[in-house]
Image (cartoon, helix red, strand yellow):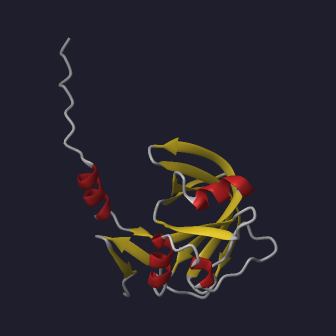
Amino acid sequence: MTESPTRQSTATPSRFRAMMSRFPSGVAVVAADGRDDGPWGMTCSSVCSVSLEPLTLLVCLRTGSPTLRAVLDCGQFSVNLLHERARDTAELFASGDPNRFDRVRWERPPAAAGPHLVADAHTIADCWLDDTRPVGDHVVVFGVVGAITELPAHRPLLYGLREYHSWPRR
């Protein structure tokens, strides 16, 4: 029997961040209604499809964030996939500004699971909380998609190499 080699990690938080910056992704704002203090939302690039039966996606939200608290309290949330002209909104919702919803156009349709950023999203998913799993300093939130709203066509906003870009034209 041969012994397995000892694993020595050369990974560090800064090297991990640099690696992930080289993996571009779409940009979303996850939003939910707080109990008594209005809507909450945060920029999120950790969005992933999970299943078609049932329609499920996941988002990763920072532990202790007011947005995560609102999602857990109300049991539902919206995922606003941002379009190429929404860089300012992505930066606003990443800033922690407590008045961010005062600075963007949003609606709360009657059957929506959370605020819809109608001027900044190309597509919005309304999700009902299905499960959560804490991982390090984040919580993986699984949502069953109950409705999808497609807005006038714009290319998606992308984030990679610590910069915002849009999907290239052909």
When the figure is inspected, residue 4 is found, relative to residue 94, above or below; the finding is above
* Residue 161 percent location from the top left of the image: 28, 70
Relative side of 46 to 13, left or right: right
When the figure is inspected, residue 157 is found, relative to residue 153, above or below; the finding is above
Residue at screen point 55% across, 70% down:
29
For residue 55, which quarter of the picture? bottom right
Relative side of 151 to 155, left or right: right
Q: How many marks?
A: 0
* Residue 115 percent location from the top left of the image: 68, 73
Determine the residue located farthest toward the top in the rendered image: 1
Residue at screen point 66% across, 59% down:
70
Which residue is at the front of the view, 31 or 130?
Answer: 31
Which residue is at the front of the view, 27 or 123?
Answer: 27
When the figure is inspected, residue 127 is found, relative to residue 133, above or below; the finding is below
* Residue 148 percent location from the top left of the image: 68, 71
What is the quadrant of the N terminus in the image? top left
* Residue 96 percent location from the top left of the image: 50, 70
Residue at screen point 53% across, 49% down:
139
Residue at screen point 59% across, 77% down:
99
Relative side of 2 to 49, left or right: left
Which residue is at the front of the view, 30 or 149?
Answer: 30
Q: Is residue 27 visible?
A: no
Q: Is residue 36 visible?
A: yes
What is the quadrant of the C terminus in the image? bottom left
